[in-house]
């Protein structure tokens, strides 16, 4: 395979399968001493700025990606803000060649091509840029090091350059496109590997995804943008190094399964609660044993505010007025979550959690007719407390939550480390153990766990939101009822999102509802669902299809879902979202059966292929 041909990571779902065929003959691949990579460039390479820490630059993420799949790599970031290729030439010996790297990644063009306000010509001419870039390549190669070129990323319309001529009349990239072309020409002429970011990002820019989401200001990448750059560079550099890559290690940012769209099918939608000019959000639901009575709780506000409660006597077809609740439910500081629990004596209870510090809980022993106030469960706090509660085979209950250092102890501060915790109850949810760490890390931010038990009951799988937005969602497994857990593994893009909630259908398939945060998806930010099997999750397969449940009109502010499965196979899934342009979010249920989705798929009633990768 010709090196550099994997530039299509962002337009292809086949990065990993392509990398499986890399040659294995290099001497450097798994040596005791690390492979040294230097990244040379301007502020885009330097990366660190407001909202982007050193660990979230593409250089740092690239190092993690390469080491995760078995390479022994150290990446040294030598980016300098505002630099052009002429300045790079003046320091390449001191800052790059003296480090004796194995590979040098060179990325310039944004500053060279830029036209300052009041000027008519770029800061550095196209001819000089091309000449300097070629000289950088030759100096690296003459010193015995392998250079790799990256084209600049295109600028977005939010860039301040759009505020003055000639950018207003000709577009923010009218000059930069020529410099990207020149970079490609140098790569061909010098026969060096090329990572063509300009093409990758431009392929999607006109359909409105990467540039807006991946940049903080129209020029500089945010953590999500750095993650995409790192994945692209990984594909080229891993091939150049020449080691085999494990197939499940790095997942593509897009998916290929069909997308079914229910957003316009109003007959499926039931409004649970709506109040003019009032934000209503983040519901969870519980279905009682009669398979008809359903209760939902949600905050009157974004993630905090007085807890509202409603009841449905007919499995979500109609809903009561807001029910009376204890006075201190109005002091809730987080998303409420409601669960059914049964103690060792067979007593049934409903419990409701509210997080941050301290985590508090309310209890009902009459199926939600009467409730206790919210009371602390211990001297600890957490974020989205107990989004999942699972009964263990011995009758105990396992609950999970996460924290980033702010709330686990009183007066805490953000550490940049996300920690996943578990707590246990041996008395049917009345009391809970002290929290125990399951995993923690700062490179990817794993949080908001959602538990799914295997069909035979022997295994627990926990799907996890990835909050740094540099990778897909992740998953961990336990074969001993939560005593020990596997190393976290990245999920396919088809399951990438926030707050996964799943239920089994009568035919054994899984329906999992979540907020779509897939890097490349036409339904990004919408309320979506995934249909597949538990085995798909175990094997890392994409699943059967994705479903857009409703179209969210404001960013990604939607979909902390409740999901209930009725005996006849009807899914009743409930969440909030900005369902009407310019209006506050409100709570809605959607009803469906998997056989209806099957019919849509058979009839070809899916989103157009051209729309799948926006």
Image (cartoon, rainbow, N blue to C red):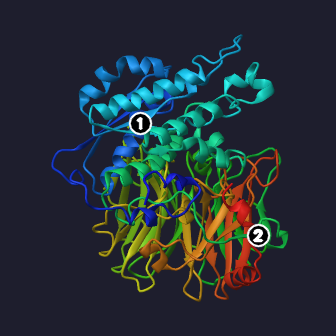
Which of pointers 1 and 2 indicates the residue nearer the eye?
2
Q: Residues within 10 Å of mark 1 (few under 14, many from 20)?
A: few
| Secondary element at image label 1 | loop
State whether residue 367 appears in this view. Answer: no
Question: In the image, 485: left or right of 366?
Answer: left
Residue at the left extreme of this rendering: 32
Residue at the top extreme of this rendering: 118
Question: In the image, 30: left or right of 505?
Answer: left
Q: Residue shown at 28%/62% (left/top)? A: 24
Quarter of the figure with the C terminus:
bottom right
- Distance, label 1 to label 2, CA atoms, is 39 Å
Asked if 306 appears above or below 479 in the picture, the reply is above
Q: Mark 2 — residue?
A: 262
Asked if 60 appears above or below 545 in the picture, the reply is above
Quarter of the figure with the N terminus:
bottom left
Residue 477 in the image, given as x and y percentages of width and height: 36, 69
Q: Residue shown at 50%/21% (left/top)? A: 84
Q: Mark 1 — residue?
A: 414
Looking at the image, tell me whether mark 1 or mark 2 is earlier in sequence order.
Answer: 2
State whether residue 553 appears in this view. Answer: yes
Q: Nearer the viewer, residue 395 or 223?
A: 223
| Secondary element at image label 2 | loop
Asked if 445 appears above or below 587 in the picture, the reply is above
Residue 588 in the image, given as x and y percentages of width and height: 74, 63
Q: Which of 329 and 529 is in front in this view?
A: 529
Q: Residue shown at 42%/21% (left/top)? A: 88
Q: Residue shown at 59%/77% (left/top)? A: 544
Residue 321: quarter of image: bottom right
Q: How crowded is mark 2: few (under 14 residues within 10 Å), some or many (20 or more)?
A: many
Q: Which of 275 and 472 is in front in this view?
A: 472
Residue 65 in the image, given as x and y percentages of width and height: 37, 51
Asked if 230 appears above or below 389 in the picture, the reply is above
């Amino acid at each position: 395979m010709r090196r550099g041909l994997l530039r299509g990571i962002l337009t292809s779902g086949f990065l990993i399968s392509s990398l499986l065929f890399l040659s294995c003959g290099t001497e450097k691949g798994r040596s005791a001493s690390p492979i040294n990579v230097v990244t040379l460039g301007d502020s885009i390479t330097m990366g660190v700025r407001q909202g982007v820490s050193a660990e979230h630059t593409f250089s740092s993420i690239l190092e993690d990606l390469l080491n995760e799949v078995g390479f022994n790599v150290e990446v040294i970031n030598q980016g300098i803000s505002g630099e052009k290729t002429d300045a790079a030439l003046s320091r390449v010996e001191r800052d790059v060649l003296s480090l004796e790297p194995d590979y040098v990644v060179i990325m310039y063009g944004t500053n060279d091509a830029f036209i300052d306000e009041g000027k008519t010509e770029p800061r550095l001419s196209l001819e000089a840029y091309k000449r300097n870039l070629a000289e950088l390549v030759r100096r690296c190669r003459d010193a015995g090091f392998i250079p790799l070129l990256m084209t600049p990323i295109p600028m977005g319309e939010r860039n301040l350059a759009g505020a003055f001529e000639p950018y207003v009349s000709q577009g923010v990239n009218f000059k930069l496109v020529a410099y990207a072309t020149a970079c490609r020409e140098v790569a061909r002429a010098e026969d060096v590997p090329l990572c063509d970011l300009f093409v990758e990002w431009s392929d999607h820019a006109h359909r409105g995804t990467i540039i807006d989401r991946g940049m903080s200001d129209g020029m500089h990448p945010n953590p999500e943008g750095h993650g995409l750059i790192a994945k692209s560079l990984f594909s080229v550099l891993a091939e150049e190094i020449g080691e085999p890559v494990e197939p499940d290690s790095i997942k593509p940012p897009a998916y290929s399964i069909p997308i079914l769209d229910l957003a316009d099918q109003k007959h499926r939608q039931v409004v649970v609660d709506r109040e003019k000019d009032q934000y209503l959000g983040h519901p969870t639901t519980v279905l009682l044993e009669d398979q008809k009575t359903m209760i939902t709780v949600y905050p009157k506000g974004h993630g905090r505010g007085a807890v509202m409660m409603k009841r449905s006597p007919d499995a979500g077809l109609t809903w009561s007025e807001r029910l009376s609740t204890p006075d201190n439910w109005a002091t809730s500081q987080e998303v409420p979550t409601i669960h059914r629990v049964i103690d060792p004596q067979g007593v049934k209870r409903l419990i409701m959690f509210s997080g941050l510090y301290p985590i508090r809980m309310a209890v009902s022993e009459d199926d939600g007719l009467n409730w206790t106030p919210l009371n602390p469960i211990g001297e600890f706090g957490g974020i989205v407390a107990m989004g999942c509660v699972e009964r263990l085979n011995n009758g105990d209950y396992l609950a999970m939550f996460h924290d980033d250092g702010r709330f686990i102890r009183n007066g805490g501060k953000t550490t940049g480390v996300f920690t996943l915790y578990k707590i246990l109850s041996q008395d049917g949810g009345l009391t809970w153990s002290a929290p125990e760490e399951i995993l923690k890390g700062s490179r990817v931010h794993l949080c908001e766990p959602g538990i799914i038990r295997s069909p035979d009951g022997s295994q627990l799988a926990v799907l996890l939101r990835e909050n740094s937005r540099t990778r897909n969602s992740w998953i961990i497994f336990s074969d001993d009822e939560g005593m020990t857990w596997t190393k976290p593994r990245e999920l396919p893009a088809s399951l990438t999102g926030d707050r996964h909630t799943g239920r089994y259908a009568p035919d054994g398939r899984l329906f999992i509802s979540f907020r779509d945060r897939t890097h490349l998806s036409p339904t990004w930010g919408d309320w979506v669902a995934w249909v597949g099997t538990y085995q798909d999750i175990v094997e890392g397969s994409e699943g059967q299809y994705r479903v857009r449940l409703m179209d969210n009109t404001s960013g990604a502010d939607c979909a902390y879902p409740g999901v209930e499965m009725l005996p006849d196979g009807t899914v009743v899934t409930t969440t909030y979202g900005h369902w009407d342009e310019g209006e506050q979010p409100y709570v809605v249920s959607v009803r469906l059966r998997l056989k209806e989705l099957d019919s849509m798929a058979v009839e070809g009633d899916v989103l157009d292929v051209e729309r799948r990768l926006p």
